[in-house]
Image (cartoon, rainbow, N blue to C red):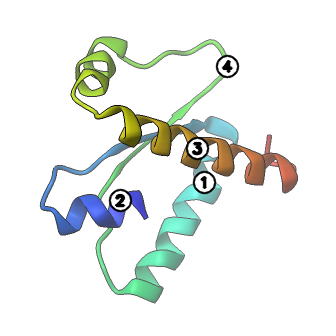
């Protein structure tokens, strides 16, 4: 899991952006993972509604530091999560 890996490498907690409609469900998922893994899984969960935006300048700076292979890996992970949310009718 992305959040756990960042914790293992002592990196600062990631900011995870999800649709506001599923934010509560994602919080529950993190609670379940915390109980199973017995770890903190520190993260910043941001729920965005349609039409809202998140500060992109910070993202551009972070994305410019990511290797291409890592960027594509993260994109694939995001696609898998979105597919799962659509499959479960959360989107």
Cα distance, mark 4 to mark 3?
Answer: 22 Å
Please report the residue visible at 23 percent of the width from the left and 19 percent of the height from the top: 61
Q: Is disc 2 placed on a helix, strand or loop?
A: helix
Q: CA distance from mark 1 to mark 3?
A: 23 Å
Disc number for residue 3: 2
> Residue 23, how many percent across, how many down?
59, 47
Whole-Å distance between the Cαs marked 1 and 2?
A: 17 Å
Marks 1, 2: nearer the viewer: 2
Which residue shows up at 58% across the image and 57% down it?
26
Instruction: From the top left corner, tell me how far across and down residue 27 is, in percent.
Output: 52, 59
The residue most toward the front is 69
Question: Which of the numbered marks, if any, corresponds to residue 50?
Answer: 4
Helix, strand or loop status at disc 3: helix
Question: Does 18 appear above or below 42?
Answer: above
Identify the element where label 1 is drawn. helix
Task: Write down the residue under mark 1.
Answer: 24
Task: Indicate which disc, 1 or 3, sits on the residue closer to the N terminus.
Answer: 1
Distance between mark 2 and mark 4 Cα atoms: 25 Å
Q: Are marks 2 and 4 in contact (CB under 8 Å)?
A: no
Residue 46 at x, y = what percent?
45, 38
């Amino acid at each position: 899991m992305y959040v756990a890996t960042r914790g293992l490498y002592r990196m600062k907690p990631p900011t995870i952006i999800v649709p506001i409609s599923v934010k509560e469900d994602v919080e529950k998922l993190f609670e379940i993972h915390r109980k199973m893994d017995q770890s903190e899984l520190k993260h910043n969960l941001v729920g965005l509604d349609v039409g809202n935006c998140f500060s992109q300048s910070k993202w551009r700076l972070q994305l410019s530091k990511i290797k291409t292979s890592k960027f594509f890996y993260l994109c694939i992970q995001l696609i898998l999560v979105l597919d799962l949310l659509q499959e479960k009718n959360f989107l």
